[in-house]
Image (cartoon, rainbow, N blue to C red):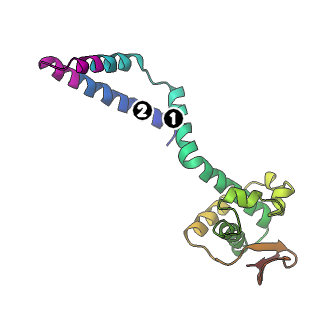
Amino acid sequence: MNAVDLFLRVLLLMAIYVVLSVIILSRIENQECSIPQVRVIDTYIEEKAEEWVPTMDMAQEYVMTLEELEAEQYWDSMDLLALCVMAEAEGESELGKRLVIDAILNRVGHPDFPDNVIDVISAPNAFTSYSDGRIERVEPTWEIYRLIVEELMEQTNHEVLYFTAGDWPKYGTRLFQEGNHYFCG
């Protein structure tokens, strides 16, 4: 949902609110009201409704709040994961890329590692592409995002935790080689 759609929805909700307030106020005015506070509250609502005019800035602020609360970390994680996979496995086969994704996802779910993608990837000495800055020089393809989504839905491998290019990692249990990467669990 873009900011304009959200702004229009906010306007529609405010219009419904004002219409309902008018209907309620007209019903109260047509009846004897024995509670004075009701009139004070209704007057306050009516005054505030007249003062409040939604702006594009307000809609944008609302959009940013939703992103921060619901989606920002998710998308930051997806983007960082895509950058890391691209930087680590750009020349590898589709399976090789999937296995790199799985290594990161398996670490997130493993008790010996942080519980989120951002902390797993940025951990000291965890991924060469992060520590040497390569991750900042690559542009992930849509294929990478597709593979990430597919691996999030159903992982190819639940054992891989480590991989290195060219030779076996010094840690973990040797599992297999795929392309230039050697994977360990």
**Does the magenta-highlighted stretch encompass residue 164?**
no
Q: Is residue 40 found inside the magenta-colored segment of the image?
A: yes
Instruction: Give percent across and percent down for residue 67.
Output: 56, 43
Element carrying mark 1: helix
Q: Position of residue 58 (x, y in %)?
A: 51, 28
Could you say where residue 71 lies in the image, as x and y percent from the top left? Answer: 56, 49
Residue 19 is situated, as x and y percent measured from the top left of the image, at 27, 26
Q: Picture quarter containing residue 24?
A: top left
The circle drawn on residue 62 is 1
Viewport quadrant of the C terminus: bottom right
Circle 1: is it few (<14), some (14-19), or many (20+) Cα within 10 Å? some
Which residue is depicted at the point 69% across and 68% down? 107
Q: What is the magenta range?
A: 24-41
What's under tag 1, amino acid-wise? Tyr
Q: Which residue is mark 2?
A: 10
At 70% across and 73% down in the image, what residue appears? 99
Question: Magenta region's main secondary structure?
Answer: helix
